[in-house]
Structure formats: structure tokens, C-alpha cells
Image: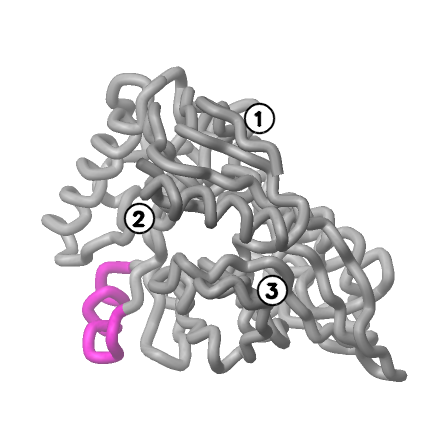
Amino acid sequence: MNLIQNMPLANTLGLASYAQYGCLLSHSDDVVAARAFAQAEGLPFRVIGAGSNIVPMAQVRGVVGVMAITTRRIIDEGDTGLQLEVGAGHNWHELVLYCVDQGWFGIENLALIPGSVGAAPVQNIGAYGVELAEVIAAVQVLDGRGDLRWLSTEECGFGYRSSRFQQCPEEIITAIRLNLVKAGHIKIDYPDLASYFRDQADLTPKQIAAAVIEIRSAKLPDPSVNPNVGSFFKNPIIDNARIAYFEDLGLSIFRTSVGAKLSAAQLIDRCGWKAKQAGQVRCWVKQPLVLVNHGATEAAHILEFASDVRASVAKAFAIELEIEPSILA
């Protein structure tokens, strides 16, 4: 492990940000060493991946480790499925492409989600009717005592865009294991995919991933061209008693096992934000759930815009939107 003072922090919002100390974490031993240094100096220790789900301040106090463990191996394989272990530093979308090339079903709906494998369980990433929790078998963490251990799916406490890791920052994810299948496991009931395939059968994971990539690319900006962190807000969950009210307003409802999911994008659009720009920040015109940075250099500019969006939605619909990316200070 090589600690670097004032290390620049890459982030897809295009903000200029520096960590007091930074380092690459290429092995679990690097995590142990970096955390020990932070503890000895009385500094906070944080781990990030590709910087695709963070809003970093100009100066980030403490030690920031960039996860770079990129191992990938089959743990167990049978006639109908397999278990794949992947290092936390592996690029998520590249993993999806690798799996669909092998003909393995399970994560094809999660194509083109930016970020690293280690970040995926933290937010329990999901898209087009699939959540990571449905296919994950276990998550390896380095706990606060420096011990490596595997957590079961149940122990991870997955919920909608949530997990135990949001409340247990001392647990550093180093690898995950996925249960993948080799045939016939498709989920295309989400409206965009259902419309795209129109009752086609015998689809391959590669076909589904290609459709997801096409749909997402048509709606979402490329962070390398228009800096963003993808969805800036979570889609709110409402209880069943409120479904009829929002249906009467003509809003889309996606029912889940815990209630119903509203489209945050629709709520934001109804409040007129699709056509607004404040300073150098605005909503993406094709998907107002995404905030795009058109030259702002400070996180405060992004967060002020987000606060205004949240306030208007709360006033119009009595819905409190939650911010999805982590704020790094």
C-alpha cells in the first residue's frame, strides 16, 4: 500500500476533489494497512470504487482507499447453474458483459449500471425488475477487527436500495458471490422491457442485456460527456393505501412485495424541473431523475439544486425524495 497525500479523487460528476490521504487497495492486506494508518492518526477511513455514486467535497478528510481487487473465479458449477466469485474492484458493467457472453442468466437486466462490484451490494443495485439481492449468494467483508468473513444474503439485510453496509461502514466489501443459471431464467415484465420484446420467448441473456443497454442509452447521459452519477434520487415506496391517490393523478405505479414504487422521475417532471437549469446544474431532459453537471466545480452547487428539487416534490406530493449517492466530506 502506497499512501498519497492530497490524492485526486476520480468521480463521474466531474468535481475537483482531493483526499487528505489516498491509496489503491489491490489486496485485503492493503485494506488492513490503510485502516490501521487512519486509526493511528485519528482519521476517518472510507473506501470508494469508480466514483460513480459519490458526491465528493473539494477536500475529503481522512484516508480514502480506491478498491482495486479484480479477481474472478467459478466456485461451484453444475449442469444448470454456477456460483461466481468476483473481486470488489471489478467493473460492474464489464462483469455483466462477461456473464452474458458465457450465456449465464441472472444479472443481464443490470447492464450499463456504472461503478464497481463492491459498490453494488451497498445500494442493492436494481434495474428493470431485478435487484442484486435476488442473485447474490454471499458478500465477503473485512470487518472492524481485520477478519475476513462471508455474510449470507440474509445477513446483508438487503432492502430497496439499501443494505446493512450503509449502517456498518467498518465492514469493507472485498468480494461477492453470485448464483447464476444457464437456461430459461428471464425477467422482462418491467414495462420498458415488456414493450421492447412484446412477448418474445427463448431470449438469451445477451439479447436482454443488449435491450437494456439500448433503453438506458436512449434515456441516460454518458458520464464522460455529461457528468452525472446516474439516478440522483431513489424511487419512493408508498404503502398500498396511497396507491389509488397517485393512480388518479395519472402517475405510474410499480407494485412490489412491500408496497408500491412511484417514479421519482415523473414526480420531478410534474414539478417542472425537466425544463429548468439553476446555475450549472440541471435535470437530464430525457430522464429528470439524473442531475447533470454543466461546469459546477463544487459539490455544494449540486446539493443545492437537489435540495430545491426535493422541496418542490415534497410540497406538491407530500413525498420526501431520498438522495441515492453518498456524500463524501
Q: Quadrant of residue 279?
A: top left
Q: Residue at x 27, y 67 (%)?
A: 247
Callout 3 crowding tier (Cα within 10 Å): few <14, some 14–19, many ≥20: some
**CA separation, marks 1 and 2?**
22 Å
Q: Residue at x 60, y 74 (%)?
A: 138
How far across and down, in percent of the image, does residue 126 sit? Answer: 52, 61
- Residue, disc 3: 194
From which residue to which does the magenta span run? 238-250
Could one spot residue 5 in this view of the protein?
A: yes
Q: Quadrant of the N terminus?
A: top right
Q: Quadrant of the C terminus?
A: top left
Q: Residue at x 46, y 62 (%)?
A: 171
Secondary element at image label 2 = loop
- Residue, disc 1: 224
Q: Earlier in the sequence, mark 3 or mark 2?
A: 3
Judge whether 28 appears above or below 241 on screen.
above
Question: In the image shown, does 323 or 138 lie closer to the viewer?
Answer: 138
**CA separation, marks 3 and 2?**
28 Å
How far across and down, in percent of the image, does residue 177 sit? Answer: 67, 69
Q: Which mark is residue 323?
A: 2
Q: At label 1, which amino acid type do we have?
A: Ser
